[in-house]
Image (cartoon, rainbow, N blue to C red):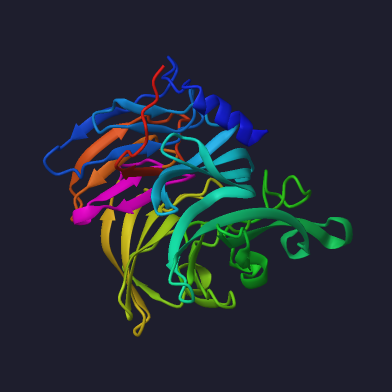
Amino acid sequence: MLLKAILTIVGSGLLVTAQTSPSLTVDLHDASRVIPGSVYLAPFNMPGAGPYVFNLTGNTIFNGAGKIAPGSIHNFQPCTYNKSMHFCLWNGTVSNGYGSGDALILNHNFLVDKAMSGVDYHEFDIKQSLDTTTGQVKDSALLTSYTAVRRDLSAYGIPNENNQGWVIDCHLRAMDLDSGKVVFDWSSLDHVPLNESFVLPTGAINGLTQQFAWDYFSIARLSSGDYLVSSRHTSTIYRVSGKDGSTVWRLGGKASDFRLNGFTFSSQHDVRVVSDNGNTLTLSLFDNAYNTFTPPHGDPSGKIIELNAAAKTARLVHQYNPPQAGLQCGNGGSLLVLPKGNVFIGWGSIPYVTEYTADGQLIYSAHFGGIGSSASSYRAFKAPFTGVTPTR
């Protein structure tokens, strides 16, 4: 029914701008230095929530609000599937910080080519790898899912039945898109002890019931080969073996294998590999410095970090500060390194997108909601628009 509904609605040509749709207001646009492209957003907590594409002057290119599928939409972005450009997004329901829904791959006409059900919204990405047996390029989807399970939480003051409270087990999965087979499955409870979390059972994650299970972990961005798993509640980035799921190293948090030279990060999102040339690994991340459960550690920012594997040191290469000081970003956020080294940042629960030169000069700033409003976009992306603009 979901796929049929999507095909019917999208195919009917009803994807038109509603009067209540979000708008992108451009505050700064240095046209000579910004990288060409379009802005991909999935605003929520505001009228007209849904997937949108805007040009750099703020005009709406695509408005899919209420037309793709019912429910929340996150991670709307261009992606490569079957050797051609597509659009990826997650659609479903969100409760207490995690989701249950469908990962959808849409073609350039916004019709569904592939759907995967029962997944969470924190990560949905498609990676390409070479099959050394056949010589063919294979597509695999990186997905997350969250499951509430029983655990002894008596050490955390949860005197539930037989001292068995509820905690979220976060799974990272790689799925072969040709066969639908899960080729890698990693469980946070199997590899990360509960005491690494800085967030204790409280409020809507008090661990007393299945509905309010303790979310001690939050999976974010992954890389190919081995995987990078980012936990905002342990403020740690884990390199996970793609062969057996074991932890290769930790960056940040309570048990870091690297010495952080003159900087910190916490409650981070969207960790990505910028470059990897053996002994030196360069990462990008969005540093929230706040998670809504514990006091903030400063302003949010984008960071580029260089790791020296031999010396086990980490240094801050660049930091990109928000459009205003004193802001707090408790949820979401993303950072993309663009051509020529420019950096594009979506500020999560701060309804802004910005672009910087590699050395940190702000050259583009736009907002889709006011500072202090509830408007958010889990992530923001910048890339050329390859779809067919719908008409009436």
Determine the image quadrant of residue 24.
top left
> In which quadrant is the C terminus drawn?
top left
> In which quadrant is the N terminus drawn?
top right
Q: Residue at x 76, y 55 (%)?
A: 166
The answer to whether 218 appears left or right of 288 in the picture is right
Q: Residue 344 in the image: state x and y as whole percent.
A: 29, 47
Residue 312 visible at all: yes
Viewer-proximal residue among 205 and 141: 141
Q: Residue 183 in the image: state x and y as whole percent.
A: 60, 67
**Image vertical order of residue 147 relative to residue 67, above or below:** below
Residue 218 visible at all: no
Determine the image quadrant of residue 16.
top left
Q: Residue 323 in the image: state x and y as whole percent.
A: 28, 40
Q: Residue at x 79, y 48 (%)?
A: 209
The answer to whether 33 appears left or right of 197 in the picture is left
Viewer-proximal residue among 86 and 299: 86
Viewer-proximal residue among 9 and 277: 9
**Image vertical order of residue 140 relative to residue 27, above or below:** below
Q: Please state the extent of the stretch shown in magenta in the rendering.
A: 322-347
The answer to whether 217 appears left or right of 162 in the picture is left
Viewer-proximal residue among 281 and 133: 133
Q: Is residue 70 magenta?
A: no
Q: Is residue 340 magenta?
A: yes
Query: Which residue extends farthest left?
Result: 32
Q: Residue 115 in the image: state x and y as whole percent.
A: 58, 45
Q: Residue at x 41, y 19 (%)?
A: 17
Query: Which residue extends farthest right?
Result: 162
Query: Which residue extends farthest front?
Result: 134
